[in-house]
Image (cartoon, rainbow, N blue to C red):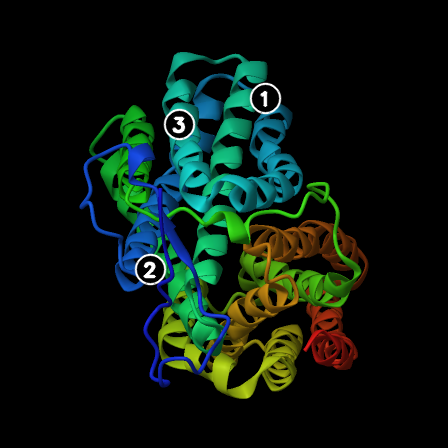
Amino acid sequence: MALVRSPLPTDRPPGSSIAAGVVAVNMTHSLCTAPSSAIPARRSYWTAWAATLTFFAGFYALLTPLPRYLISAGLPDSHVGLVLGAFGIASLLGRPLAGSAADRWGARPVMLVGAATLLVGALGVLTTANVVALFGLRLLQAAGYVAFTTAGTGLIVAITAPSERGRRLAVFGAAANLAITLTPAAVSALLAIAPLSAGFVVAAGLALVAGLLAAFLPVIPATARGTGRGAWSIPQRLWAPMSAAALFGMGFAAFFQFAPILAERRGTIEVGWLYTLYGTSLILTRFGGGGLVDRWGIAPTLTFTAALMAAGLAIFSVATAPAWLGGATVLLAASGLFHPALIAHHAALLPEEPGRASAVFYVGFDLGVGIGSWILGLTLERAGVAGLYAAAAIAAISVLPLVPLMVHRTSIIR
């Protein structure tokens, strides 16, 4: 095994950042032929980006055919919801395990397992109509998603210098945004001329390609591996940023989960346009604004993004005109810089365990989406769409009291 210190190139002079990312390349465990020399960090970054784009495309390729398959298999609506809901269980339980595994054994093997699991989970659906088996296969799909994305994010944290980590994470996250923007529509067009099974074959094929790309990625070295804490142990210094991630997750859920209801009740715009505008704006935000995360630091970035999200959600609560609804959507997309900012902050607070740091962020965010959706659903029932988005705006602005706690904790560690 060859260990190579190779931070991703930056615009700063050599040596300006002691905590540069470290790459370890273990060529003896590669699943396919690769050059004998160590893989440069820049190439590793873009290989991880391409692998992640391909993996997300494979996962999102299931969005259209899976519900249709479950219905065609004769499952009642309650069983359809049960199978689809398996994703949330795997996400919450699997994130800490994936993060711990990535720190202990490296990101590459965990990503390979994730790709293989998605492949099996996708193709396996075509072999059964049993609800228990389908539930298990959905768990496999979700476990693959959790393993691949958590380990991939931890790898990016490990190989990038802290001085540019926010920008690198922002661009890395755009891979998922591109996939969700393009894949469902492409698969829907395919299924208009091909049998339903084609969607699952495409998903499996993309998972295979993602795994082949991941085989060329470096392994996190022993010096960056776990410290022996339990997988579900969350250090106290991460409680505040994890809570902020949950509040942002609730604000995100208000748009992503409830936008169809908003569009239907306002009756002035098609929800598809809102999702397309959001996806396009978020991609532009990540590519164009990612550098702001590094220049501003955590406090200004979170203050700005929380204000943007709260403003967008508040507009949703009262607006009916398409222009106002579109403007609110752009504000929400611009607030998406909180995502790389918080991942980078988690990593700064837990530098010895980048996988666990990434996992804690995602657990907080996923909890915010899940529990937030329940809270917002109850709010919708009692206060309508206006009340739902007002409550979500309050959640977003509630990030602000947490910012001083995060800054204080960072200053203590430094």
Q: Secondary structure beneath disc 1?
A: loop
Q: Secondary structure beneath disc 3?
A: helix
Residue 63 position by quadrant: top left
| Residue 265 point in image, percent of width and height | 60, 62
Asked whether the residues under the numbered discs 2 and 1 touch, taking CB atoms below 8 Å apart as contact, a structural biologist would say no
Which residue type carries mark 1?
Pro
In this view, the residue in front, 75 or 30, is 30
Residue 343 position by quadrant: bottom right
Taking 318 as reference, is 401 left or right? right
Q: Which tag, 2 or 3, sits closer to the chain's start?
A: 2
Residue 168 position by quadrant: bottom left
Q: Which tag, 3 or 1, sits closer to the chain's start?
A: 1
Q: Which of the labelled discs sits on residue 76, or is there none?
A: 1
* Residue annotated with mark 3: 122
Q: How many neighbours does mark 3 have within 10 angstroms: few (below 14), some (14-19), or many (20 or more)? A: many
Q: Is residue 154 above or below residue 312?
A: above
Which residue type carries mark 2?
Tyr
User: What is the distance, in whole Å, between disc 2 and disc 1 at their CAs?
Assistant: 44 Å
Q: Nearer the viewer, mark 3 or mark 1?
A: 3
In this view, the residue in front, 7 or 209, is 7
Q: Secondary structure beneath disc 2?
A: helix
